[in-house]
Every structure is written in structure tokens, then in C-alpha cells.
Image (cartoon, helix red, strand yellow):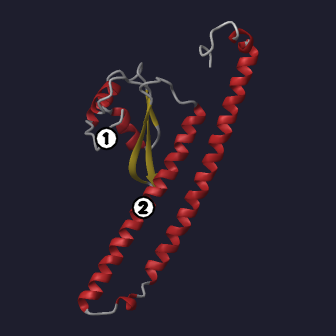
Amino acid sequence: MNRSIKAISVNMERQPTLQNAIDRRLQRPLFPDRNPEELPDLYSRLDIESVGPTYFQPLVSDGELLAVLMIGLPYTGRELTDHEQELLKGIGIIAANLLALSFSAKKARISAESRTIEALMEGRPVEDLGDDSALTLWNEMRGELTAAHDQIGQLQGQVTSLKIQLDDERSDWRNRWGIRRKARRFPSGLLR
């Protein structure tokens, strides 16, 4: 829609499924036929007229809730397959770890800046700070970042595998129902 959403206000009393996802720290779906009040409320806050299946994926790292990822399909109305839901869970794990890493890096940077400012104000040389905890934190963050890169690679492999499976299923379906033969009877562009 060529517009960015800066922030939205959500009335948690009108979003029990979101509240449940937060409380249990588990993925929860919303469907138009089963959540006729929650979905219109949510999409009206996003200024989107259509409603469709929506999935809340809590981003949890070390038992701490950092955020909630919302995936909505208001225009297609398509539900995620089991594989796609598992992929969303995997993305949630990686996103939570990257978010936690980002928060840790920000805290470490602020702490280092604070120590540097204190040293300068006290007239001590910055080189004398020799902080082993900063080096330890840096090594831990590097290890976590490497693990996150590995997880991203695994998920990319799963996505590629799912795409191949989908293409195979489409091909089998076309062959089974003879779509290629029937497609010749229709003007080009009707069947894709």
C-alpha cells in the first residue's frame, strides 16, 4: 500500500488470542470464521479493509518475551500450511535471538561509552580501561551471531526444500488432471 506503519495501539481486551500468545509464548492463529471480532478490530487499527488469517509468533529469548511477530494474509485469505507454520516458528527463534543480540550489543555499547566518558572526566587515558568483560561479551555475541547465521542457513535450506516440494506437487497435480492438454483449449493466460 506504499505506506509505512510507525506504531499502532492495540486494545488487549479485544485481542484475547494475542494475549494468549503472549501469556503462553506460543504461536496462535486467528481465522475469519473463528475470530469474527478480533480480526476486524486488528485490521481496522492497521487501516486495512480486508481481513484474513493472521498468525502471532512471540519472539522469546531465554524465557523473556521481546516482541510479537504478526503475519497476516488479508488479501489472499490463505492459511499457512503446517510446514509454513513450523517455518514461522523457526523464523521467530532466529528473530528473537537476533533481537536479544541487538539489545545486548546496545547495552554493551552504552556501558562502554559510559566508562569512556567517566575515564575522560577523571583524566584517565581511555587505553587504560582494559576491560576483560567487554572482550568476553564481544566473544559471546560473536558466537551467538555465528549460531544465528547457521540457523538462517538451515531455514533457507528448508525454504528451498519446501519450494521444490511445492513445484513437484504442482507438477504432479497438473499431470494427474491433464491440465497441459486442456490448457490448449483455453486462450493463453487463463491457466498459470
Which residue occupies 44% across, 48% down?
59
Residue 45 point in image, percent of width and height: 27, 32
Which of the 4 image quadrants contains residue 9? top left
> Which-is-in-front pick, marks 2 and 1?
1
Instruction: Give me the C-alpha separation between circle 2 and circle 1.
Output: 22 Å
Quadrant of the frame with the C terminus: top right
* Residue 62 visible in image: no
Circle 2 residue: 102
Total numbered labels: 2
* Crowd tier of the residue under label 1, counting other residues whose Cα lies within 10 Å: few below 14, some 14–19, many 20 or above: few
Outermost front residue: 188
Quadrant of the frame with the N terminus: top left
Which of the 4 image quadrants contains residue 69? top left
The earlier-in-sequence mark between 2 and 1 is 1
**The one of 118 and 33 positioned closer to us in this rendering:** 118
Residue 33 point in image, percent of width and height: 42, 18
Please state which amino acid type lies under the numbered disc 2.
Ser
Residue 5 - label: 1
Q: Is residue 12 left or right of residue 58?
A: left
Which residue occupies 26% across, 93% down?
123
Helix, strand or loop at disc 2? helix
Q: Is residue 104 left or right of residue 41?
A: right
Query: Above or below — where is 18 with respect to 94?
Result: above
